[in-house]
Image (cartoon, rainbow, N blue to C red):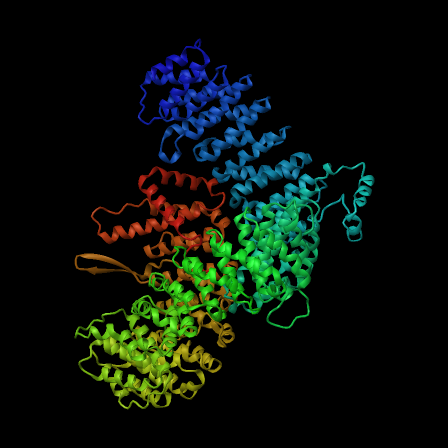
Amino acid sequence: MHLCLHFSQSTFSLCPFRFMATNDLMMELQKDSIKLDEDSEKKVVKMLLKLLEDKNGEVQNLAVKCLGPLVGKVKEYQVETIVDTLCVNMLSDKEQLRDISSIGLKTVISELPPAATGSTMTANVCKKITAQLTGAIGKQEDVSVQLEALDILSDMLSRLGGTLYSFHSSILTCLLPQLTSPRLAVRKRAIIALGHLVLTCSGNIFSELTEHLLAELKRNESTSTTRTYIQCVAGISRQAGHRIGEHLEKIIPLIVQYCNVDDDELREYCFQAFESFVRRCPKEMDPHISSVMGLCLKYITFDPNYNYDNEEEEEEMMETENGEDEEQESDDEYSDDDDISWKVRRAAAKCLEAIVSSRHDLLQDFYRTLSPALISRFKEREENVKADIFNAYISLLKQTLPTQSWLHSSDASGKDDVPLTMLQNQVPNIIKALHKQLKEKSIKSRQGCFSLLTELASVLPGCLADHVPALIPGIVFSLADKSSSSNMRIDTLSFLHVLLCNHQPELVKVIRPLDKPYTFDAKPYVKDLFPGTLKRLKAADIDQEVKERAISCMGQIIYNLGDHLSTDLQPTLKIFLERLKNEITRLTTVKALTLIASSPLKIDLRPILGEGLPILASFLRKNQRALKLSTLNALDILVKNYSDSLKPAMIEAVLTELPVLITENDMHVSQVTIMFLTTLAKVYPSCISKISSSVLAEIFQLVHSPLLQGGALNAIIDFFQALVLTKTATVGYSELMKQLTAPVYSSASAGASLPLHKQAYHSIAKCVAALSSACPKEAPATVNQFVQDVKSPKSSPAVQVLAFLFLAEVGRSTNLSAQRELRTVILDAFASPSEEVKSAASYALGNVSAGNLKEYLPFMLKEIGSQPKRQYLLLHSLKEVISSSPADSLTPYVEDIWALLFKHCECTEEGTRNVVAECLGKLTLVNPAELLPRLRKQLSAGSPHARSTVVTAIKFTITDHPQPIDALLKGCIGDFLKTLQDPDLNVRRVALALFNSAAHNKPSLIRDLLNTVLPSLYNETKVRRELIREVEMGPFKHTVDDGLDVRKAAFECMYTLLESCLDRLDIYDYLNHVEDGLKDHYDIRMLTFIMLARLSVLCPSAVLQRLERLIEPLRATCSTKVKAGSVKQEFEKQDELKRSAMRAVAALLTIPEVEKSPAMAEFSSQIRSSPEMASLFESIQKDSASLPTSESMDVS
């Protein structure tokens, strides 16, 4: 160390030595272990400051780099010495010294510890620098010094604004005069500095600044300063938009007035200001939106020096160049370079884009006024402006999309379709406007066209059907044009791909519909489309993306036009074979081949099957899941459509790969494999017998797995039925039955518990029932055997459960009245000691009754009335009857059932009430027109119990697919939701559950009621002191909050509304309640953390405005400590809470521009400086990196 100092001190020594010594010094300073005593500190500091004035630039640069690590190693007064010297040097006459000193100051500032660490050094040093800088800015004649000083000040304000609190007013006083500086660069930097200042300054200073700006805007001394003031307003609103909200009433009229001044730059800044207001203060901008939109629409066409009117006639002339020359001559005195009107148009387009993306609720107005205006401007001559016009239109299309995806298309009520219909009517104009653009020289314009068309095709699938002939020349031009970049081609091909996918029945219908008669002759287009795509398909040295698009495109062409390709077909298929062997393109090729094999044109694939099939078989061994699935689909289609061309040997090669694929670890792959096996069993029954043992072992394993359900289970049932029908000896009926039920019988010990998982019994019962229905001769014997099993006292509970579930499956579809003793057997089982047997018997009774209503239903109703002990089980059976019987067969019994249910709707037992409610709800679906009004009447009558039953019943009438009851429900659900104000707590809770179910499954039912319902919903999120009571448990007192369940239900509703009705919420009001939830009970905090994460994706700008208030509770959660000696659960609970809070923090950090918030910056540095929080944050980030991009709770 001393050596370094010695060398660097000896100014006489050669420059390389000083360089090396300084370099060594830097290395030393970067080590953590280094400790300096006071004497060395002085020497090092003095030395470095001297080296900053070194004649050699290299040495100066190194010396500056040493300052960084030095700041953390020396005492505070030394840092102040450094800063003083640097500030003085900044005012020096030597330019090089000034530059190096300003770099030095920036280095020091970036190394100062953040204020949160509690170090006083930062505050003191900053104050020193600020005092010097404000002086320098104020009195400096030299512009470059001013610029540097402003730059450093901005740096400091953005990193450490809060620390300079006491200086804010002097900084403001120093910056405001700079806005009138004769140098534009100075004004610009002053605006940036003010932007950083408003992030942390107090309300008074902010008001002082806005008052000043308003006064100056009113004075309008010169256009040049007015421009600057408008830029400044826009800059402030971009940085701290939420603060400027309250001043907008005064600001907007001024800016509107300046839009009409004839100065292009001024107008551009006005629109930039509008854009930032719209993005940052959507709520306050609401009253001004229409006037701002009017201005945008006026100025988006503002092109005073160019005449668009005679374009139409000039088109032909423009093709030849002379049109251009005439233009030139007439416009001699005016050159295009002076014309900056395009900047006004661009700013207006950007402002429109901001309005469109933030105001979903105005969609219909947009389509009325904005859409035609934008379409008419697609002819814009300046490509930068055109790009923004395209962006605004794409934004409009994107806004049109969400309503469909949330409101599962079945639920889009007529009203939500209005924008789509309006868009549909404008499609011809869009195509007409884009048609010319697709032939433009400019690549940027063409890419814009294709992005717009791609978006259009995905918002309105099929809308381009009638316009394909107009688009084809443009597509071919972009693919074949020499000047097209590979990105241009990718965009074109991806549009073509979307076009072909979204217009499967249609575009293709355009060129060549395969599902109905057509008049349009596709032949002439084949010669355009085919060679273009073939060229890309053959090329080996192009982008992978282009390769993949070319393969899928060619697949589509062969699917639709294969019979026109005559001799070209086989060579093209051979290329596909080559692409199959290539690891990069194999997946896309498998998908393309699947498409070709399913073509109704019966494309001849024989030449490639011999070589292709073994390759496909080998893919089943690969580790890539998508490849396995696509390959199984391809094989399935090939076996179905090309069975005569496949030899048994080929099939066997595939068969050996299948058993491994059947496993509960991947149900979907198993399902697709079993579906393929079913096809094989039907097409090649002989092959199946060869592998039946290995495949069956795996399938039985699946049947007995707790995870089996849905699609995979249905696939297995189909397979068993196909298998039994192959009449192969080794897999006959009795053999399969034995294997299926073996685990149940083998464990027939007297133990009461079930050896398999409950789900497995249902699966086995369904499979056994399917086998009996495939072999009707065997069925009666099987039914008898199971009835005997139930009767026999020796049967274990497991056997009885299986028997009942089997009888339920069979009884639902066939009339079991031949079994005389069945009814008594079931009722006896109601007294069984095993709960599982009881519930299986109740399920069986319900299903057997559904198969034979006349005999069983009156009997069941009588039992419910007379047997209070069995009532719960019998009501469950009744629920099964109502769920599984068709409406018309139930009609004669509706009145009796209804009367009976209403006797029990006030039962004190909540479990029973819920079953009654479910029965009522499902019964209402049988005859909604008559029964729904009856339920509504019951609302006013009855006890709280009865009301809660009725409200819950309505919940069971709402499903996620369209039902005849929907229109009736929409009319009266408001009355049921009035129970959100019911005096009884429990009724309010079930009303919230009803609301949540509606918002989740059929948002259209409640979208229009939100204005009246939301206040009641928000009311339930508040903590009610009167519901909190103390319970004594032995020596301890324990607080119980009876209102917690209701609050939880209310927050769950709020979460659901985010997904389905976001456009109808006042997000700021909503955030107030989220904020309260962040400080509530454990369960509710967990919920609101998830909401916060979702909000930061859905409406980042609103969250950004509230950031300071939202971060506090997060910080509190992340830094709580559990009391020592607490129980393990308490530690786990806190840990889970912290993880959840940290996930919310991680989500907030993804919001663009969040780093500008001082509160967030401070919290981030607090996380980094606390080892515990930092490690938690890292683990959260690792988790989120391994997850798929969308949140797991994402329903949209």
In the image, residue 838 above or below residue 238: below
Is residue 90 found left or right of 913 in the rendered image?
Answer: right
Question: Which sits in the foreground, 445 or 888?
Answer: 445
Can residue 673 be seen in this snapshot?
yes
Measured as percent of width and height from the top left, residue 173 is found at 54, 30
Quadrant into which the N terminus falls: top left
Question: Which sits in the foreground, 773 or 63?
Answer: 773
Question: Which sits in the foreground, 22 or 652?
Answer: 652
Q: Name the residue furthest top.
A: 12
Can residue 258 be seen in this snapshot?
no
In the image, residue 39 above or below residue 525: above
Answer with the quarter of the image where residue 454 lies: bottom right
Measured as percent of width and height from the top left, residue 494 is found at 57, 54
Answer with the quarter of the image where residue 731 lies: bottom left
Q: How many marks?
A: 0
Answer with the quarter of the image where residue 574 lies: bottom right
Is residue 14 found left or right of 30 in the rendered image?
Answer: right
Please give the name of the residue rendered at 38% of the width and 36% of the height, measured from the top-left corner: 116
Is residue 806 found left or right of 1074 in the rendered image?
Answer: left
Please give the name of the residue rendered at 24% of the width and 54% of the height, measured from the top-left corner: 1129
Measured as percent of width and height from the top left, residue 492 is found at 61, 52
Question: Which sits in the foreground, 626 or 850?
Answer: 626
Measured as percent of width and height from the top left, residue 781 is found at 29, 86
